[in-house]
Amino acid sequence: MLVRGWAPQTAILAHPAVGAFLTHCGSSSLLEAAAAGVPMLTWPLVVDQFIEERLVTDVLKIGERVWDGPRSTRYEEQQMVPAAAVARAVARFLEPGGTGEAARARAQELAVKAHAAVAEGGSSYNDLHRLISDLMETRKI
């Protein structure tokens, strides 16, 4: 089901059947998954994505690394992630009582906070309105 105004990925993440999101750790994808309350399996590819992965796995604890093997941002040092490693990570993350359950609970708590922040009267809502007011006031000068 595609909700009008939503990007397809956002609509998919909002579906209750989604148990986890396998992500390359791009900023937009992480924000969309967190706002949907979906835990993540991380598979970063380039420099900033490795930093984003640490935010998801080590700080927010709403995800888990797909593979802990050798990783490098240098093309000549990159290695193929074995399919069996991906299958094990997904199975482990989605098994009842597994690490994914705790990550899902934390992701859903984070989603509630994110929605509250953008709702009328929320911190992001208020900050955006303050910015708009400040810009309009500056324009008058």
Image (cartoon, grey):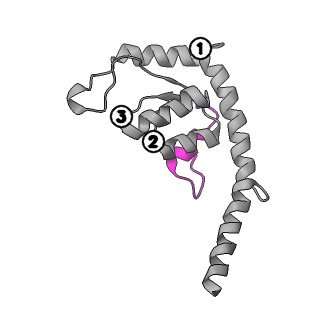
Residue at screen point 75% across, 49% down: 116
Rendering coords of residue 119 (x, y %): 75, 55
Q: Earlier in the sequence, mark 3 or mark 1?
A: 3
Magenta-highlighted residues = 1-22
The disc placed on residue 108 is: none
Q: Quadrant of residue 123?
A: bottom right
Asked if the stretch drawn in magenta spans residue 7, the answer is: yes
Q: Secondary structure at mark 1?
A: loop
Q: Secondary structure at mark 2?
A: loop
Q: Magenta region, mostly helix, strand or loop?
A: loop
Q: Amino acid at mark 1?
A: Glu
Q: Secondary structure at mark 3?
A: loop
Residue occupied by mark 3: 45
Residue at screen point 67% across, 73% down: 134
Q: Amino acid at mark 2?
A: Gly
Label 2 neighbour load within 10 Å: few <14, some 14-19, many 20+: some
Residue at screen point 40% across, 32% down: 44
Residue occupied by mark 2: 26
Name the residue furthest left.
76
Q: Earlier in the sequence, mark 2 or mark 1?
A: 2
The disc placed on residue 95 is: 1
Which quadrant holds the C terminus? bottom right
Real-space CA distance between mark 2 and mark 1, rounded to the nearest whole angstrom: 26 Å
